[in-house]
Image (tube, rainbow, N blue to C red):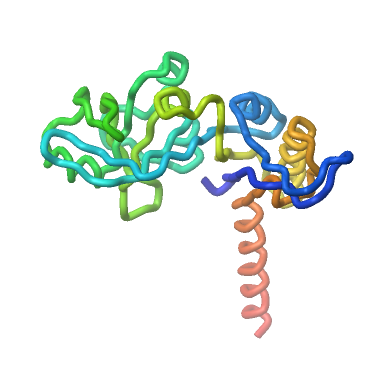
């Protein structure tokens, strides 16, 4: 989405209230609850990172990316559903072992056979296929999506999250920066770090880049018109 924003945790680089720099900031499910209720936030998804994911079905197998998420990630990253559905709130609340396969994964494992309702093994754990999707604007569809709450329990993630993907309700750079500032301040209060410390909490604001790029193109158009 044009108005997307991503946040990820790191280590502090600025001393704060008597605490030295170098403290690791660990995001949790509580941070998800804080962010989604802030003014100006439209869609929110927390993500817990899984590495080295092997997918298998019958005699077919391959290594792909498993993205753990909340339902709102579909809107943040403009994911297109080809068949079935995306992760929903029932999956989250009941810790269902559901999976949405990227189209390339489906093609490799199922060879055009029906996949909805079948079970694939993710790192040797069976997950029920509930949907097939394509990534917005992409040509390679090698990501699979599973409920973040399920991943935390099945893969020993406790309540930890590694990053957030969200969209914001802003139309100007100033509005966008104000929302980003409120998010940073809310998380800084909870985890006790300086809200300006970009090492403790990294961020990328896509809307800000888009608006700045539009201004540059507008300036170029004006310049060409003058010439």
Q: Quadrant of the C terminus?
A: bottom right
Drawn side of residue 138 relative to residue 107, left or right: right
Of all residues, the one furthest to the right in this rendering is 18
Q: Is residue 199 above or below residue 33?
A: below
Drawn side of residue 78 relative to residue 141, left or right: right
Q: In which quarter of the image is residue 133?
A: top left
Q: Residue at x 65, y 46 (%)?
A: 10
Q: Which of 89 and 189 is in front in this view?
A: 189
Drawn side of residue 187 relative to residue 36, left or right: right
Q: Please state the horizontal and vertical placement of residue 131, each as a whole percent of the image.
A: 29, 30
Q: Please state the horizontal and vertical placement of residue 16, each as a whole percent of the image.
A: 85, 43
Q: In this view, does 59 lie above or below 137?
A: above
Q: Residue at x 78, y 48 (%)?
A: 21
Q: In this view, does 89 lie above or below 31?
A: above
Q: Which of 174 and 112 is in front in this view?
A: 112
Q: Which of 149 and 2 is in front in this view?
A: 149
Q: Which residue is drawn at 31% across and 48% down?
A: 141
Drawn side of residue 139 relative to residue 8, left or right: left
Q: Please state the horizontal and vertical placement of residue 147, each as a whole percent of the image.
A: 42, 27
Q: Residue at x 29, y 33 (%)?
A: 122
Of all residues, the one furthest to the bottom in this rendering is 227
Q: Which of 77 and 93 is in front in this view?
A: 93
């Amino acid at each position: 989405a044009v108005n997307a924003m991503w946040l990820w945790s790191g280590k502090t680089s600025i001393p704060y209230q008597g605490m030295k720099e170098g403290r690791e900031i660990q995001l949790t499910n509580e941070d998800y609850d804080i962010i989604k209720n802030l003014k100006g936030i439209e869609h929110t998804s927390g993500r817990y990172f899984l590495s080295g994911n092997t997918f298998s079905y019958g005699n077919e197998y391959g290594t792909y990316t498993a993205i753990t998420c909340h339902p709102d990630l579909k809107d943040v990253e403009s994911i297109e559903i080809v068949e079935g559905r995306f992760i929903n709130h029932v999956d989250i609340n009941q810790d269902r072992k559901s999976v949405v396969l990227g189209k390339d994964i489906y093609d490799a494992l199922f060879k055009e056979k029906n996949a909805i309702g079948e079970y694939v093994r993710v790192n040797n754990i069976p997950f029920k296929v509930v949907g097939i999707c394509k990534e917005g604007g992409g040509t390679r569809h090698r990501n699979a999506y599973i409920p973040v709450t399920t991943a935390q329990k099945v893969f020993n993630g406790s309540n930890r999250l590694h990053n957030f993907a969200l969209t914001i309700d802003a139309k100007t750079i100033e509005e966008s920066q104000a929302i980003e500032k409120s998010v940073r301040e809310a998380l800084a209060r909870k985890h006790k770090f300086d809200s300006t410390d970009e090492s403790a909490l990294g961020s990328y604001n896509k809307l800000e880049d888009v608006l700045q790029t539009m201004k540059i193109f507008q300036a170029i158009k004006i310049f060409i018109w003058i010439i």
